[in-house]
Structures are given as C-alpha cells and as structure tokens.
Amino acid sequence: MDKKVMDILLAGFNGTITEADRRYYIDNCMGAEEKEIGKPYFEMDAAEALKFGVLSHNNTKGGLTGYDCQRCKNRGEFMIIKNGKAYFRDCECMKIRRSLANMERSGLGNLLELYTFDRYKCVHPWQTKAFNTAKAFVVDNNAHLLFICGQSGAGKSHLCTAVASKFLKRGMDVIFMPWTDASMKIKQAMRSEGEYEQLIDKLKFAQVLYIDDFFKGDNAARPTSADIRLANEIINYRYNKSRIDKTKRYITIISTERTLEQLQQYDSALAGRIIELTRPNYLVGLFGEEKNYRLHGGGQ
Ligand SMILES: [Zn+2]
C-alpha cells in the first residue's frame, strides 16, 4: 500500500480526512468488500465492519485440492452472520471431498467406474430382480445387510460395488474387504495383538463394510475354524450394534459363492444373524447354469 493511501486511511480513522481525500479513496482505493458494503472501511459501524471481515474471509483462497469449489474458494468453510455474530460453516463441497477421499481409501479403485448401476445389464428376469433389490437397499434407511450369493460370473461384485459407490457418493465411509486377502492378513496379525485389533476394528466399526467373495475357497472345502471365528467376530459386533444403537447405522454388503445352506452347515448361528440382518428382503441368490453372467457376455 502506498504512503498516500496509508495517510488517507489514517486520517479516515482519526476523523481528520478532507473531502477531496475521501472522494479519492472512494473512487480509487476501495476493495471488493468495501464496494459491496458501499462505504470505506473507516466509515463502517460495528455491524458493517463485521460484514467486511466476513466478506474478506470468504474471498480468501484456500489450499484444499482434489476438487475445485467456487463457493468456498477451496477453503472448505465459509463465514456467515447470524444474530449479529459471525460463525463458520462447512461448505457443501466437504461432503464431496470426503467422498473422494473415502473412494480412494475404500480400496475399490477403478471398479467404482466399471461396476455402476447404469452399466449393469438386465438380460434375464433374475438379473432384474437382483438389480431392483440392490437399488432398493441403497434408499432404504433401515436396511442393514445386502447379501448376494451366486456362482462366479453372476454379477455379484458388479451389483455390490454399485451399491458401495452410492454410499461413497453420500460421503459415507466404505471399507472394502476382499475376503481371501484381508482374512489372511488378519489371521497373520493374530500373533501381535495391537495389529490384530487395529485391522479387525476397522472392519467392525466401518460405517459401510463390503465383504467381497466371503468364505471364498475351494468350493468343496469348509472355511477353516479361524475363518469362521473371524466372520463371527465381525458380523456379531455389527449385528449387536445395529440392534442396540439405532442412531448409528452399520451397513454391510456381502457377495459370496457360498449358498445359505452351506453357511448354515458351517455355523448356524452366524447364518441366522446374517439372515436376520437382511430383513425385510435383501437376500439375493443367483444360482443355476443360466445365471452364469459371463457365459452370456453380460458385460461384467
Ligand atoms: Zn466448497
């Protein structure tokens, strides 16, 4: 700021400003905020000065990256005045930013673009039914668990990913658990308690947990007792929580090649909880030769 303007400002604050200097300042020196309020800063009353501060803040550029928001200029917040006081508010873009970060953290990567509802082709009636069930699950605020079982290539992962994606877009935290890899890692971590707790807590507490290829393995082989214990620990926790704490939702999405009958043989209590959580009707079975989606070039 040059000396002349500085002197005019000081004179303005001291009340010794000449009319010529005042006119000069108004014509040449007012910033965007002063123009919006319609007077130089040194003539503002307390309420106008507060508005000036809020406008100045809201015009400042922020440093957030990943999404360009015109509204908050990438600060993620803006100030408002309510009853003569200034308050900070989160910008709407924070939801989008969280959702983008969650997408990255979810581990689903480019599957999210590939496996959308729009790209799911309903060729057979059973596909339409599965598709409608998955869509209904997304908008049902009381739904707990979507269970899609079916043979390889039936389109299970496609629908489950499309559902997970919808929750991510709402800014919810989705944890992706590819069963085989994740369970292996957790079982290995059992030897060190801290690490084990950390891994399993993430799954137990997840707002949305997507377990892909649950109990995957040689079809004839039962899951190991360690696998069954792990499944129980996660499902039981989420089952109990969803019954006790109605204020917080624990949404679970499961895709598996195992049938419900198989699950019942492995552990009837676990199967019972899963069935209960899928109420009213979020249990989808895709079995039978004609349901091998890939064989029909269904676009998975
Ligand atoms: Zn914003």
Image: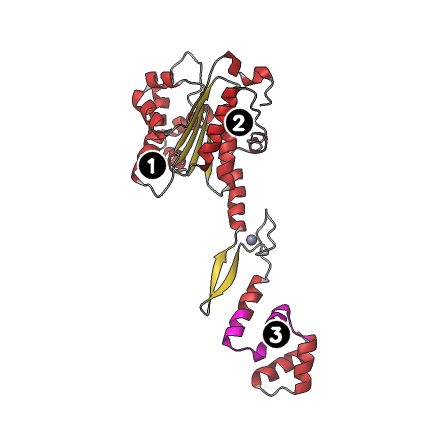
Q: Would you identify the image quadrant in which residue 83 lies?
A: bottom left
Q: Is residue 114 on the magenta stretch? A: no
From the image, which quarter does the C terminus lie in? top right
Position of residue 186 measured from the top left corner of the image (x, y, whole percent): 40, 29
Position of residue 40 measured from the top left corner of the image (x, y, whole percent): 61, 77
- Circle nearer the N terminus (1, 2): 2
- Circle nearer the N terminus (1, 3): 3
Q: Residues within 10 Å of mark 3 (few under 14, many from 20)?
A: some
Position of residue 277 measured from the top left corner of the image (x, y, whole percent): 35, 30
Q: Is residue 36 on the magenta stretch? A: yes
Give the residue drawn at x 55%, y 18%: 293
Cα distance between the residues tagged 1 and 3 = 56 Å
Instruction: Name the residue that disc number 3 marks.
Output: 38
Q: Would you identify the image quadrant in which residue 298 lies?
A: top right
Instruction: Name the residue that disc number 2 marks.
Output: 158
Give amino acid for label 1: Ser
User: Which secondary structure dominates the residues rendered in magenta?
Assistant: helix
Relative to 156, is 249 on the left or the right?
Answer: left
Q: State how the image is colored.
A: secondary structure
Instruction: Name the residue that disc number 1 marks.
Output: 242
What span is colored magenta in the figure?
A: 29-51
| Marker count (numbered) | 3
Q: Which of 134/68 is in front?
A: 134
The label on residue 186 is none
Give amino acid for label 2: His
Q: Would you identify the image quadrant in which residue 255 lies?
A: top left
Q: Which of 225/90 is in front?
A: 90
Q: Residues within 10 Å of mark 1 (few under 14, many from 20)?
A: some
Instruction: Confirm if mark 1 falls within 8 A of ligand 1.
Output: no
Give the residue drawn at x 32%, y 27%: 273
